[in-house]
Amino acid sequence: MENLSLAGAMRAATATAHNEAEHTTFMEDLVSGNAPKEAWGELSLQMLYVYRALETAARKHAEHPVLAPIFDERLERLAAIEQDLAALGLTERAADPASQLASTRAYVEAIENATPGALVAHHYVRYLGDLSGGQIIATMLRRNYGLGDDVLNFYSFPGIDKPKVFKDEYRAALDALPADEAARAEIIDNAVQAFHYNQAVFVELEKTLA
């Protein structure tokens, strides 16, 4: 893995954790149309807290040398999630701290306490996931649940016309980050952990909706 670029090393290191998160019962049921109809709203509710923490932290460290090359306001999801929750009638629940699951709180705390290097990892896992597999999820949600664009703003990136080009440029920026061996290891390790945090949220959501 030492011979791989940073983006390549992150992808290789996170492959197992990514697969495990993707294939939790909750996500498989959601994508296949077998989850309860309220599942999308419940996931969106948890993502509200995650992205609030992520985007607050990213803006705070936006000029740090290790984060600045990948920071891009066009990626921000918080306003889109708030629109979705309003359309789903969940705005009031979103304002209630009790709506945040324990697994989500742990995820949020990890982001809030992240160094700029660790934040790069969280940034990569969430946003590149939204621009990649997230687009497939949106298609399946439309198909299997009849959901409209008014509740799927989360996966809409009106400021990014060509997602593939953007992702290629994002990965190139990752590869060019001023990261020595220790910083590179921190980013990779935290990317793996980020997938574990996501998996924990999915597992708890499954139990909550059972």
Image: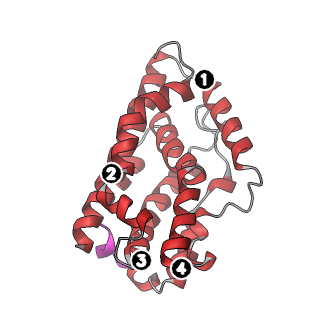
* Residue 57 percent coordinates (x, y): 51, 50
Secondary element at tag 1: loop
Q: Give the residue at x 49% y 44%.
A: 125
In the orientation shown, which residue stands out farthest toward the right? 161
Q: Which residue is disc 1 drawn over?
A: 178
Question: What's the distance in space between the residues labelled 1 and 2, CA to CA?
Answer: 30 Å
Q: Which residue is disc 3 drawn over?
A: 94
Amino acid marked by disc 4: Gly
Categorize mark 3 by other alpha carbons within 10 Å: few (<14), some (14-19), many (20+).
Answer: many
186 to the left or right of 58:
left
Q: Which of labels 4 and 2 is toward the front?
A: 4
Q: Give the residue at x 36% y 36%.
A: 16
Sequence-first disc among 4 and 2 = 4
Question: What's the distance in space between the residues labelled 3 and 4, CA to CA?
Answer: 23 Å
Sequence-first disc among 3 and 2 = 3
Q: Which residue is disc 2 drawn over?
A: 199
| 52 or 206: nearer the viewer | 206
Q: Badges 1 and 4: C-beta atoms under 8 Å apart?
A: no
Q: Which residue is disc 4 drawn over?
A: 146
Q: Which of labels 3 and 2 is toward the front?
A: 2
Sequence-first disc among 3 and 1 = 3
Q: Badges 3 and 2: C-beta atoms under 8 Å apart?
A: no
Q: Badges 3 and 4: C-beta atoms under 8 Å apart?
A: no
Amino acid marked by disc 2: Gln
**Residue 190 in view in this figure:** no
